[in-house]
Amino acid sequence: MPSANDMILTRLLDLGKILNQPREMSDIIREIMTTAAEAANADGLFFFEISADKYMSLNYARISSLQTQKSGAFENTRFFPPVYMPDIRSKMAKRPAEICACNREIINYDNIYAATELDTSFIARFDEENNYATVSVLDIPLIDRKDNLLGVAQFINARNNAGKVIAFTSEIQNMLISICNLITISLENRISEANYKQLLESFIEVLARAIDAKSPYTGSHCQKVPIITRLLATAAVEQKEGALKDFELNADDWYALHIASWLHDCGKITTPEYIVDKATKLETICNRIHEIRNRFEILRRDAHILYLQKRLANTDNKENLQAEFVARVKQLEEDFAFVAECNKGDNELSPADLKRLDKISEQHFVRYFNRMLGLSWAERNRVKDPELYARPAEEMLLQDRPDQMIEHYNRGELYNLKIPQGTISKEERQKINEHIEVTINMLEALPFPKELSHIVEYAGCHHERIDGKGYPRGLKGDQMSVPAKIMAIADVFEALTARDRPYKEPKKLSEVLSIMRDMKNSGHLDPDLYEVFIKSRVYMDYAEQYIEKSQIDEINPEEYL
């Protein structure tokens, strides 16, 4: 038959295994306290927790002879209501656990009721209600390496082999201190882990908000994509049939997906704001259509001057000259209206539109003032012939000048106006697409633990397509994980429902789902996840809370499958 010491050793070895398992802290405390009580042959135990906001509460209680135990601060509130630590210090008579906590010292009483200076009301009430007799009491403060008080371990009624209540000897006391140190180590590790986790999440959130804050028009994208991601991932996990019936996410997977959804656009921190916010083709820091309009104003004024000059010179009769002037003004107005419409990027330009832009650009006006005045040194360095810009000259109405080539970007007016559709040039589109490469590089540089190693893949695939035509890697559907494909749908849905984008008007929910259905049919979005998205009404769960009521119209889900 194994000895008592062998049994204690076995229990301690079991504790070592428990501490290496991902278990709730309350379970670990219960196991350690129970092991300590059994090692000391103590009949009862109480664990008092000290919270970060300095409240002391009874978290766990157990009396073996009564075959009773209570877990959780709420259940034990009636016996020991939470007490604010600074208030304890002002009390004249303190409970044993309170003295232990305030003085940070071990309290060991052979007979608790013989100590008249103590407040034994808590113990007396417990004894009376349970027909119990508390005699010997030992309280041990749990202090971590940074001198933080984490709790108090209290043991009552040590017993000898005959079952008689005895005092807690110094040998038993030292043994209990050693075992209870496991609670201190576990609590300290959990608190540190929670603090670092909170720091990581706070840093992630700050970074995401900073990216959103770069643009007043995409000010909540990084904050809303995680919401849609969570809704769709939850719906996918709940599937009982179909292609996703075996899809599961463990705790690490959920956390990795959470972080990835917050950081999926972190690379946009390097994308210029004027590109992200580019509402018109001519927009850089401002919309340059105003500069072109002023040139049309000059041409109109020139036409008026020419009309007056011809009148004075009697080159023709008044009616003919007026008709000529009116026709010229009408042509200028029509040409400017066309240029202004091209600037918006709402409709795709036809070959005829491009030819008309070329023809309009060939019109000239005279510039009299020195173009070199008021330039920065960088602007001056881009001008190859300063003398040409310094003297008056005829210039084209729509210009593509050499000095408008800035690094990789062509800011030529005609070049940008001729963007076939939308407002972004191919160089600007490449820069926007580059953000995902930057995102991947940034995330790969972070030393994520093994259980979070999928973050890079989850975040780095949200612009990939099922048919392999996405970027940056051109991955196909079977080369991506389900969480990565979930994020792709979340990113698209948020962008389509957003009402704060300057380059598009807010879309109705039916329009958004029609576009997404077409994207699914064209090989952009995963069809299985898209089906879950529609059938589980993920779109509506999100819409009811996060998009304008005016955007929500009547939806028949069957129409969008």
Image: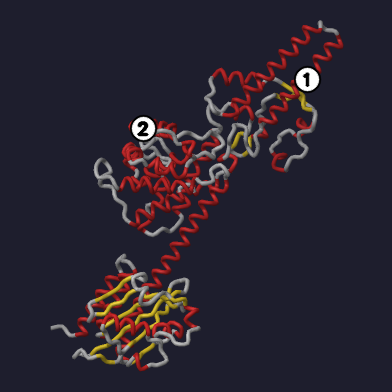
Residue marked by disc 1:
302
- Answer whether labels 2 and 1 touch (C-beta < 8 Å): no
Q: Is residue 147 above or below residue 206?
A: below
The residue at 39%/33% (across/down) is: 555
Farthest residue to the top: give it.
317
* Percent x, y of residue 348: 52, 25
Residue 119 makes an appearance in the image: yes
Q: Which residue is painted at 29% across and 80% down in the image?
A: 129
Specify the label residue 77 is tagged with: none
* Label 2, label 1: how far apart the Cα atoms are: 59 Å
Q: Position of residue 362 (x, y in %)?
A: 67, 20
111 or 495: nearer the viewer: 111
Q: Residues within 10 Å of mark 1 (few under 14, many from 20)?
A: some
The residue closer to the viewer here, 161 or 6, is 161
Question: Which SS class for mark 2?
Answer: loop
Taking the image as drawn, is residue 49 in sight? Answer: no
Disc 2 or 1, which lies upstream in sequence?
A: 1
The residue under label 1 is which amino acid type? Asp
Q: Mark 2 sits on what residue?
A: 556
Q: Could you tell me which quadrant the C terminus lies in?
A: top left
On the image, which quarter does residue 356 sit in? top right
* Structure colour scheme: secondary structure
Picture layout, residue 279 above or below residue 88:
above
Judged from this view, the residue extending furthest toward the right is 312
Report the number of numbered marks: 2
Residue pictured at 77% horizontal, 11% vertical: 322
Name the image quarter holding residue 1.
bottom left
Amino acid at circle 2:
Asn
Crowding near the residue tagged with mark 2, few <14, some 14–19, many ≥20 C-alpha atoms within 10 Å: few
Q: List x then y, in percent, for residue 317.
A: 81, 5
Which percent across, then down, holds residue 81? 40, 75
In front of the other: label 2 or label 1? 2
